[in-house]
Image (tube, rainbow, N blue to C red):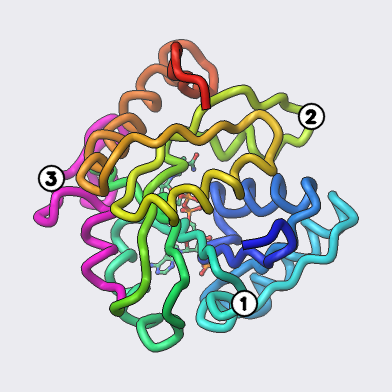
Amino acid sequence: VTPLDPVPVIGGTGALGFGLALRLASAGVPVVVGSRDAARAAAAASEIHDRTGCPVEGMVNADALRRGPIVVLSIPFASQIATLKGLRDAWAPGQILFDATVPLATAIGGRATQILRVPQGSAAQQAAAELPPGIELVSGLHTISARVLADLAARLDEDVLIAGDSADAKRRVASLLATVGGLRAVDAGRLEAAALIESLTPLLIGINARYKTHAGIRITGVAC
Ligand SMILES: NC(=O)c1ccc[n+]([C@@H]2O[C@H](COP(=O)([O-])OP(=O)(O)OC[C@H]3O[C@@H](n4cnc5c(N)ncnc54)[C@H](OP(=O)(O)O)[C@@H]3O)[C@@H](O)[C@H]2O)c1
């Protein structure tokens, strides 16, 4: 991965995906916004271009996915399996899925401060089961507020816990995140740790509601 590899964002029209795409673009990383709808993708890409001056493309998810080695998945938990099944034939060996999915209880009408038990262990492990061979999965981004990402005037100063079974894939994702000033990746371990990381989101949502803020997390005592 070089800093200039395009980064496809599946669900790049949504809150988190758009915010991340905006931050990457403003750091000079080429971004490809993916959507189920080409016009929605183009509109989001055009807004990111207008706000950053960087060239940004928008296209349907399967076409976006083919454009870069690290593919961000930023869609609701309820649509994760169906979306990945629909994209199964688009992958090329060696690509990495960077999955931000959180199994919030809102997927079944519950509260955003509660998490669902996923049979595979976590949303990330559920996603990994839907990938063809040769695609590594890294889980992360769960504690980053979409609102803060989308506000380019807001200073980022927080960690992104990442989990995955490939040390190389985690290194590549960490380098990508380092291009966004104020974000530091911390390796939280193998993919099974994703369940622990995903559970931080409903925790933060509750904290945010009580303190009327958009809190993130910082791991102390770790130099990386
Ligand atoms: N928002 C946050 O601050 C935040 C923080 C950490 C983690 N997360 C996690 O990140 C993921 C994305 O969150 P979000 O808030 O960005 O979600 P969102 O805005 O509700 O949705 C993101 C995108 O997913 C696509 N989508 C929606 N319904 C779909 C469906 N039924 N099938 C396929 N695609 C669908 C839409 O894109 P198109 O309609 O253009 O296809 C939408 O723009 C979630 O799993 C969330 O838990 C969010």
Q: Which mark is residue 117?
A: 3
- The overriding secondary structure of the stretch rendered in magenta is loop
The residue under label 2 is 153
Tell me: residue 9, above or below residue 64: above
| Numbered circles on residues, count | 3
Q: Which mark is residue 67?
A: 1
Q: Quadrant of the N terminus?
A: bottom right
- State the residue lying farthest toward the left: 119
Q: Is residue 113 magenta?
A: yes
Give 110 or 104, whichever is nearer the viewer.
104
Quarter of the figure with residue 125 = bottom left
Q: Residue at x 45, y 13 (%)?
A: 220
Quarter of the figure with residue 154 = top right
Q: Residue at x 40, y 81 (%)?
A: 87
Is the residue marked by circle 3 packed among few (<14), some (14-19), or many (20+) residues within 10 Å? few
Q: Label 1, secondary structure: give it.
A: loop
Task: Name the amino acid type tagged 2.
Answer: Ala
Q: Residue at x 58, y 61 (%)?
A: 12
Q: Label 3, secondary structure: give it.
A: loop
Tell me: residue 91, above or below residue 214: below
Mark 2 or mark 1: whose residue is earlier in sequence: 1
Residue 127: x percent and y percent? 28, 63
Is the residue marked by circle 2 packed among few (<14), some (14-19), or many (20+) residues within 10 Å? few
Tell me: residue 164, above or below residue 143: below
Label 3 and label 2: CA atoms lie apart by: 37 Å
